Image: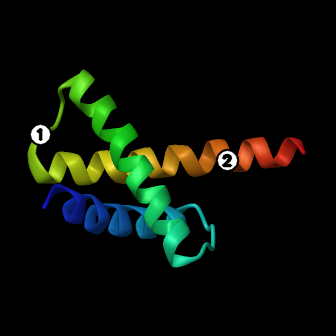
Amino acid sequence: MPILYLIIVGAAAGFIATRVLDMRTSVPMTIGIGMAGALFGGLILRLVGSLFGFLGGFVGAVIGAMLLIWIWKKLSERG
């Protein structure tokens, strides 16, 4: 069940993050970005201790995905 949860939250977070930052990606890439963002953002929010539960995990996933997209865009501009 945790894997299904990660995929669902990752897909939603990736979708929101890619639309907010105007990045068009495929569905698997969007889910991957969201899942990575969920792991990254969830870790940060747990360390900070500001939000907990489903809402905190979702917010962390969106923030983490947006951060990863921003980093990706900055690195791709260099090349």
How far is the residue under mark 1 from the one under mark 2? 27 Å
The answer to whether residue 12 is seen in the rendering is yes
Q: Name the residue under label 1.
A: 52
Which residue appears farthest toward the bottom when viewing the image? 27
Residue at image location 22% in from the left, 66% down from the top: 4
The three-letter amino acid code for the residue at tag 2 is Trp
Q: In which quarter of the image is residue 3?
A: bottom left
Q: Residue 42 carries which label?
A: none
Residue 10 image point, x, y percent: 35, 61
Quarter occupied by the C terminus: top right
Q: Name the residue under label 2.
A: 72
Residue at image location 79% in from the left, 48% down from the top: 76
Label 1 residue SS: loop
Q: Taking 48 as reference, is 13 left or right?
A: right
Q: Taking 47 as reference, is 51 left or right?
A: left
The three-letter amino acid code for the residue at tag 1 is Phe
Label 2 residue SS: helix
Q: Taking 45 as reference, is 41 left or right?
A: right
Residue at image location 28% in from the left, 39% down from the top: 42
Quarter occupied by the N terminus: bottom left
Which residue appears farthest toward the right when viewing the image? 79
Residue nearer the viewer, 33 or 24? 33
Residue at image location 27% in from the left, 62% down from the top: 9
Label 1: how many Cα within 10 Å (few below 14, some 14–19, many 20+): some
